[in-house]
Image: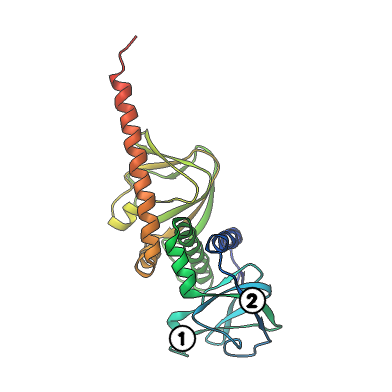
Amino acid sequence: MLANAELAQDFNRLNQQHKELVLALLDVVNIPPVRVEVEATSEGNFRGFDGGKFYLVDSGSISARYRGRTIYFLEEGDMLLPDIAGLGNQDVAVFYGSEAGASLYSYPALEFMQRVFAEPAAIKLWTRLLITYAGMMLRLTAARTHEDSQATPGFEMFDAGDIIIRQGERADYVFNLSSGSAEVLVDDVIVGRISEGEIFGAMAALTHADRSATVRAETPCAVVKVPKEQFTDLIKSNPATIHSLLIDMANSIVNLNEQLVGLRNSARRPQT
């Protein structure tokens, strides 16, 4: 995705991650695509545009226009998710076209999502893709507004030993561990670990409570963080996010139980 605005370097990292997630998701879903050739489009949506399909840009570029203004460009490897909400209202719809033409692959949205919901690995990829996409859109929005915001989306890198979230702090963000591994500590005691692809920090954000644990990078980590309000909206609009979140929470509980059993066994072991 190419933004028609000045954006920070972390937007490029999110963009690259988004493309990698798209390819991984398409590999799991495994639906044969239909090729669509897009002619130069001066206004409106390109000929053959279907709000019931997802599109992948194979070559060329697709522009997204809102109220007559180009907001961003989709390039090779980007997925076009039609603006379903705006299809019924031309005044607020997003229009997609190409100044010089492009080649796309189309996928039926209904069958695509049925396959996503049928495969746990696809659900996790879809959730990560949406979180990454939300981060990109929020950064794009932030670049176009002069209003101050207390919580802004971002992509951060942490070295081993760095604190990602700290116990007792206010929960403004929900996190997705893009790469690396992290430790979970309660009162400086390790009670679990977070693996690549897992969502964390959601419980405190959803319950409006302070952080109940510290998360410390065990290895170099790349983390996508999304403001809690945006994550709440994502949950309301996408049931797959709830499923993925429950899986990660269940894994956290299992890890915590195993850690507690280990601590209990250590306490019972006779001193020599």
Can you tell which quarter of the image residue 101 is in? bottom right
| Vertical order, 253 against 12 (above or below) | above
Q: Is residue 112 left or right of residue 47?
A: left
Q: Nearer the viewer, residue 160 or 75?
A: 75
Q: Earlier in the sequence, mark 1 or mark 2?
A: 1
Under circle 1, the secondary element is loop
Under circle 2, the secondary element is strand
Q: Amino acid at mark 2?
A: Leu
Q: Quadrant of the C terminus?
A: top left
Can you tell which quarter of the image residue 191 is in? top left
Mark linked to residue 87? 1
Q: How far from the left and from the top, in percent, is residue 198?
A: 45, 50
Q: Nearer the viewer, residue 210 or 124?
A: 124
Q: Amino acid at mark 1?
A: Leu
Q: Is residue 224 left or right of residue 190?
A: right
Q: Quadrant of the N terminus?
A: bottom right
Q: How far from the left and from the top, in percent, is residue 184?
A: 40, 40
